[in-house]
Image (spheres, grey):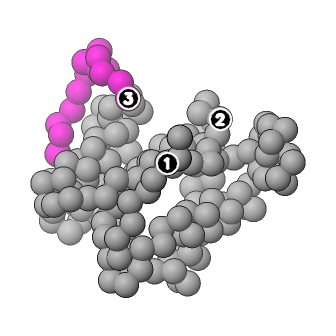
Amino acid sequence: MQYRRSFAQGATYFFTVNLAERDHDLLIRHIEALRISFRKVRQTHPFEIIAMVVLPEHLHCIWQMPEHDMNYPLRWALIKANFSRQIPRGERISDSRKDKRERGIWQRRYWEHQIKDDLDLKRHVDYIHINPLKHGYVTRVRDWPYSSFHRSVKDGLMTLDWAGEIELSDQSYGE
């Protein structure tokens, strides 16, 4: 089966990107390296980050691509490579990755969804911001430091108590 990606110039996309080893916490342990990687790529290949959350082993984000550009695969390749270069070696590396001289930090593929309309955008932004709560990392969205939620509050788009507070025992759902 051949996977087909959606490409449209200037489109808005939701992404989920995972580490190869889902039991690691590299993304938050090396959050500054991830931030540097994003900044570096955005300098040479601009895009707007509408919303983003970084969890220990995966991240979700929404990007608005420039008007005449749709090359998000290049941007992801550069972000992943830049981050990987900043992280000490030590991860498990499969034989197929060794043969291609690849690190074993990231899953090769990622999931993308082209945002269709304002309601679709709102639902995906909400999904991003609620994700740390959903995974049980915090009981209030505002307590997760690696989220664009804080920017949304500062910009007046959301309130600090958005999504309220949950008891840990209330988390009967998972990803």
Tell me what residue is drawn at x 45 percent, y 53 percent.
4
**Rendering coords of residue 13 (x, y %):** 34, 61
Which amino acid type corresponds to the residue marked 2 in the rendered image? Answer: Glu
Which amino acid type corresponds to the residue marked 1 in the rendered image? Answer: Tyr
- Disc 1 and disc 3: Cα gap in Å? 22 Å
Crowding around mark 2 (Cα neighbors within 10 Å: few <14, some 14 to 19, many 20+) is: some
As drawn, 126 above or below 61: above
Which mark lies nearer to you, 1 or 3? 1
Name the quadrant containing residue 136.
top left
- Rendered-image quadrant of the C terminus: top left
Crowding around mark 3 (Cα neighbors within 10 Å: few <14, some 14 to 19, many 20+) is: few
Please indicate whether residue 114 sits to the left or right of residue 106 in the image.
left
Name the quadrant containing residue 104.
top right
Determine the residue located farthest toward the front in the rendered image.
Answer: 1
Tell me what residue is drawn at x 41 percent, y 80 percent.
69
Which mark lies nearer to you, 1 or 2? 1
Whether residue 55 is visible: yes
Whether residue 37 is visible: no
Crowding around mark 1 (Cα neighbors within 10 Å: few <14, some 14 to 19, many 20+) is: few
Give the numbered dot on residue 175.
3
Residue 170 magenta-drawn? yes
Q: Which residue is mark 2?
A: 21
**Rendering coords of residue 148 (x, y %):** 34, 58
Q: Give, as a single range, the part of the protein colored magenta.
A: 162-175
Judging depth in this view, the residue of 96 and 86 nearest the camera is 96
Give the numbered dot on residue 3.
1
Tell me what residue is drawn at x 21 percent, y 32 percent.
165
N-terminal label among 1 and 2? 1
